[in-house]
Image: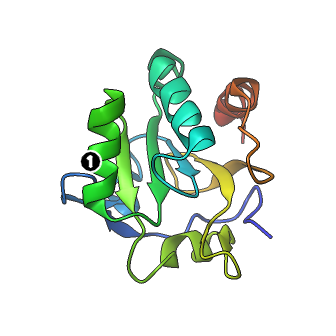
């Protein structure tokens, strides 16, 4: 079961696709974060979701939010994926310990060995304001992100 609204988002530090450390705590008090877990780089549904999020960057920027997309892939695979698709999103490698951050959010599927398609909208104070998950192969609708971002301004 994924973490629900009102929970404090677990802090993490993961390398991005360039190897630079990205820490959630560094964003606290600065801006909201939309943390998007995907199963694997280069898979069809994940690629479609990544393209859609990148194409709608203005939606997130308008809410002052930063999108961080995480998978269990190595940073090298994530960099190749971002370059192949020409996207500017920050991709995070939850490679080792394998799926550790996804697990802390209740989004890791132990039996399958990858993260579920779960999203967490975290306000600047570090509180989860929205969380949602879809089934295997099922893309998250952009409308779910819009609704979640609308709720950022409310306590």
Measuring 33% from the left and 38% from the top, which residue is drawn there?
Answer: 82
Secondary structure of the residue carrying numbered label 1 = helix
Residue 104 on image: x %, y %? 59, 76
Q: Is residue 71 above or below residue 131?
A: below
Viewport quadrant of the N terminus: bottom right
Q: How many marks?
A: 1
Q: Nearer the viewer, residue 86 or 57?
A: 86
Viewport quadrant of the C terminus: top right
What colouring does the structure picture have?
rainbow
Measuring 75% from the left and 65% from the top, which residue is drawn there?
Answer: 2
Q: Nearer the viewer, residue 124 or 105?
A: 105
Q: Is residue 119 above or below residue 50?
A: below
Label 1: how many Cα within 10 Å (few below 14, some 14–19, many 20+): many
Look at the image and tell me whether residue 118 can be seen: yes
Measuring 19% from the left and 60% from the top, which residue is drawn there?
Answer: 19
- Residue that carries the numbered disc 1 in the rendered image: 79
Residue 136 on image: x %, y %? 76, 54
Q: Is residue 120 above or below residue 60?
A: below
Residue 153 on image: x %, y %? 65, 31
Look at the image and tell me whether residue 15 can be seen: no
Horizontal side of 57 relative to 147 (left or right) equals left
Residue 85 on image: x %, y %? 36, 30
Q: Quadrant of residue 110?
A: bottom right
Q: Is residue 125 above or below residue 141?
A: below
Q: Nearer the viewer, residue 46 or 55?
A: 46
Measuring 69% from the left and 64% from the top, which residue is drawn there?
Answer: 7
């Amino acid at each position: 079961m994924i973490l629900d609204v009102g929970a404090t988002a677990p802090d993490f530090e993961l390398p991005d696709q360039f190897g630079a450390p990205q820490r959630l705590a560094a964003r606290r008090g600065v801006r909201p974060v939309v943390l998007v877990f995907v199963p694997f780089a280069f898979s069809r549904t994940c690629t479609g979701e990544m393209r859609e999020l990148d194409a709608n960057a203005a939606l997130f920027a308008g809410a002052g939010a930063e999108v961080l997309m995480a998978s269990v892939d190595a940073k090298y695979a994530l960099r190749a994926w971002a370059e192949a698709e020409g996207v500017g999103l920050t991709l995070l490698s939850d490679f080792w310990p394998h799926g550790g951050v996804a697990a802390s959010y209740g989004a890791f599927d132990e039996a399958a060995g990858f993260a579920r398609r779960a999203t967490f909208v975290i306000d600047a104070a570090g509180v989860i304001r929205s969380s949602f998950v879809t089934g295997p192969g099922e893309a998250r609708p952009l409308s779910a992100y819009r609704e979640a971002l609308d709720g950022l301004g409310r306590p």
